[in-house]
Image (cartoon, grey):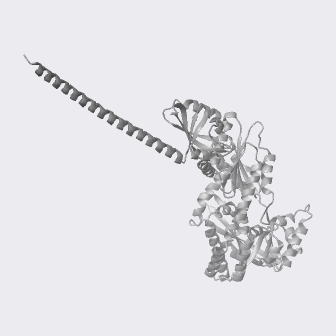
Amino acid sequence: MNSPEELHARQLARESRAREEAERLLEEKSLELFLEMQERQRALDALRESEERYRLMVELSPDAILIESEGKVVFANEAAKKLFLDSESLRLLGQSVLDLAAEAYREQVAERLSRAGQLTEPVQVEEIAKRLDGSHFEVSVRRAALLYAGQPARQIIARDISYRKRLERELAYQATHDSLTGAINRSSLIDKLNDAIGFADRHGFPVWVAFVDLDRFKQVNDRFGHAVGDTLLRVITDRLTNALRRDDTLGRYGGDEFVLVLRGGPENHLTPGVIERLMDSVCEPVTVDGHELKVTCSIGIATYPVDGRSAETLMHHADAAMYVAKESGRNLCQFYNNELNAQLQYRSTIESELPHALERKEFYLVYQPQISLKTGRIEGVEALLRWASPRLGELKPDQFIPLAEQTPLINQIGDWVVRQALQCAAQWERDGLGSLRIGVNLSARQLNGIELLRIVQSALDDSGLSPQRLELELTESLMMSDIRLTLKTLNALHKMGVQVAVDDFGTGYSSLVYLQRLPLNCLKIDREFVSALSDPADRHADAIVSTLIRLAHSLNLRVVAEGVETRRQLELLSKLGCDEIQGYLHGAPQRAESIPDLLRTHLPSDWV
């Protein structure tokens, strides 16, 4: 049995161990609490740092950031204040979010705000916003729900996209409109025409496609420069636009060509008055930089669904009809029809065969004598081009030369004609048949300066003939088409010694001032005036022809009357003082191999 002292010692030992254990546990708990407090402090520091970083990002953000709670703006960063024009008198905080939206967008904004609290991800939309001063601008907006100061709120991030949207509209406009005139371009025109066809098809209405080409517009550019031509195109565009009806469309097809899409309907009909109004709007004179310009237009019209059911077909047929109007004399309107279609197919065949005619030697020349009324002798012959096509038959120049003029082929044909005519004249001279003058017609594309001079000089050199033996014939309308080029070219031909005749005189629009300045040798009276001499009912024919002859003689020009077919015409022309005649009275144009016999059997006494 333990003594009391031993028991007391044991009790003290137990109490000491208990005290040590308690101290140990207390120390461990204190350490845990210390570590926990440190962790909390770090979390608080991180949160504070995160909030500071977020606040800094919000303040420095280039985007406008607003927080809305209960319909009012409760926070706005500096970008937002700048964007919405916050000032001393106009405060953004407290403004209704709906009041910051354009009137037309308020209903949409209210709906989006009502849905924003349900969204877990921001949704970006484009809207029209309103600044505090009432001005509008385009914005890209994202809205998302959040808690702000412990209350449900919405964060709104807005970015000004006015510049981008303006640039997009400009690019879209440029893609669909002509940069010079502002009219819609070719691709947009096709879209508009397809829309009109679709509408017309549903309602049983017609649609008219009018192809408008300005006549002689190239002369404006050549004479006054492209800047004046561009101004003229803009004026014509405005006039055509004003002449159209509300549902019609104007587009620029290219160059000086426009296309009109004219919609039919219960109130819309393509009447002669509508066409006349369109043509009058083009023909009215335009003053540009002090120059009064006047152009006319040729119009071709195709009708849906009669002339085609697709945009491409209608455009093609309207274009074809326009070319017929232009070739028929310009300043005309031509509707597409079945007969025209046959003409176009014939024209297409000519176009496909023409490039091979020279190499196949299908061209040939015929010659018509020009007889002096003073001596009765054959002074010269006019060389006339013919085309003996195996597929198309015999063709005269007016059937294929206008098509050749649209290609470089016209220079090759012109070169061949001049060379062939001069070689024949040289052969006749070698055969002792006299020194005949050779007349050769020039087309519009051949009056081209240096190239024409090269062709003429080369042909003269090859033939060995004197330049005075060659007489180039130009219509007066051709000479006046570009008077500066005409003067330059004819002066160069005059220096070479080549003679020049004005063909079909009286049917064009020659200025007597220019006629005096041009180095001319001959004036040819058109067959229409000569034909009128045989008509007793035409009391003015003698006076007109007499005036033309006196005018030519006052300018020291030889006068040749074309198309002389009767003895009465011959007698009247002789009495009026005409120098030479040419026509079927003496005989039809003949091939080169027949000319020697004609020269040998000709009796001058019969024509004096």
Question: Can the viewer see residue 390?
Answer: no
- Above/below status of 264 relative to 563: above
Q: Is residue 362 left or right of residue 586?
A: left
Q: Residue lying farthest left? A: 1
Task: Please give the name of the residue rendered at 74% of the width and 60% of the height, measured from the top-left corner.
Answer: 232
State the residue in front, 515 or 403: 515
Name the spot of residue 160 as percent of width and height, x first: 59, 46
Looking at the rendered image, the quarter that the C terminus falls into is bottom right
Task: Please give the name of the residue rendered at 88% of the width and 71% of the height, measured from the top-left corner.
Answer: 547
Looking at the rendered image, the quarter that the N terminus falls into is top left
- Above/below status of 237 relative to 384: above
Q: What number of labels is visible?
A: 0
State the residue in front, 94 or 273: 94
- Above/below status of 236 relative to 488: above
Name the spot of residue 351 as percent of width and height, x first: 61, 58
Name the spot of residue 474 as percent of width and height, x first: 74, 71
Q: Is residue 254 left or right of residue 156?
A: right
Q: Residue 494 appears in which quarter of the rendering?
A: bottom right
State the residue in front, 364 or 84: 84
Question: Can the viewer see residue 32?
Answer: yes
Q: Is residue 186 left or right of residue 573?
A: left
Q: Residue lying farthest top? A: 1
Q: Is residue 331 left or right of residue 26?
A: right
